[in-house]
Amino acid sequence: MLLLFPVVAAPRAATRPGPSLVDERLCTGCEQCYVDCPYEAIRMVQRSNGRAGLMARVDAERCVSCGICAGSCAPMGVGPPGRTGRDQLATVREYAASWKTHAPRVVIVACDRSGAGASTFNGTHGGTSVCLADCAGSLHTSVLELLLRSGAHGVLVIACPPRDCWHREGAKWLEERMYREREAERRDRVDRRRLRLVHAGAAEQARALDELRAFETEIAELDAALGEGEVPDLIRMCDRPDDRTSMHRGKERVSL
């Protein structure tokens, strides 16, 4: 019975998320997705369209659709169907369009298995918007920039602890992209004071809430320093040199 359990418990083929795909036109052969994939589901092969060099190819049998490759690809040429970096940006644009003149002060982007799971912040903070991802490591850093450009005053990313990431290296790679220039890294033009990455496991909801309150206080102080009646010029701030994903609006869930 124990030997049969993995077979019985495996999701039916029709319900499994699709494996990642590679857009050969966008792939530069940099090998970052190959290096970052925690399941060794990507290999580098010779191009088949007459261009010289290598390109990434996904082994569908090994791929679990974690999306970490989507976060690792600077040109956004690889990822699960509908969840590449380009798909993430398209959904954020649609999502931000609903803010109109009332952007949330803080947007939380979080792994749905972390301490910021689907119910942690519901109804807790009216000025907070929550976006959930299957793995924080699937988040492309360009999404953080676009959220600020769209009007959010701060973006708080909540990931599982690196030692306990559901997809092995997702939390670790995200931290290195945000702070240690790992491809695809956070751009220097993004004001890092308005970005924060914290680690909180599924049982650490209180920690996640404490981190949110502390970050909200810091963002309020940054805004207050601008002067009475003045609002942060987030576009200018982003332009200057400076040091399965889904989005929730209340109870509504919109898939990327």
Image: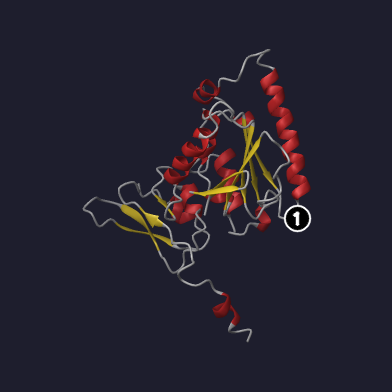
- Rendered location of residue 174, percent (x, y): 57, 46
When the figure is inspected, residue 241 is found, relative to residue 162, above or below; the finding is above
Residue 184 is left or right of residue 8, and the answer is left
Residue 242 is left or right of residue 79, and the answer is right
Instruction: Kindly identify the amino acid type of the residue bearing the numbered disc 1.
Output: Ala
Question: Residue under circle 1?
Answer: 203
The residue tagged with tag 1: helix, strand or loop?
loop
Give the residue drawn at x 63%, y 84%.
2
Spot the residue most to the front. Answer: 251
Residue 173 is left or right of residue 208, and the answer is left
- Rendered location of residue 56, percent (x, y): 37, 56
Towards the viewer: 22 or 28? 22
Figure quadrant of the N terminus: bottom right
**Can residue 173 be seen here?**
no
When the figure is inspected, residue 82 is found, relative to residue 241, above or below; the finding is below
- Rendered location of residue 179, percent (x, y): 59, 38
Towards the viewer: 66 or 244? 244
**Can residue 204 be seen here?**
yes
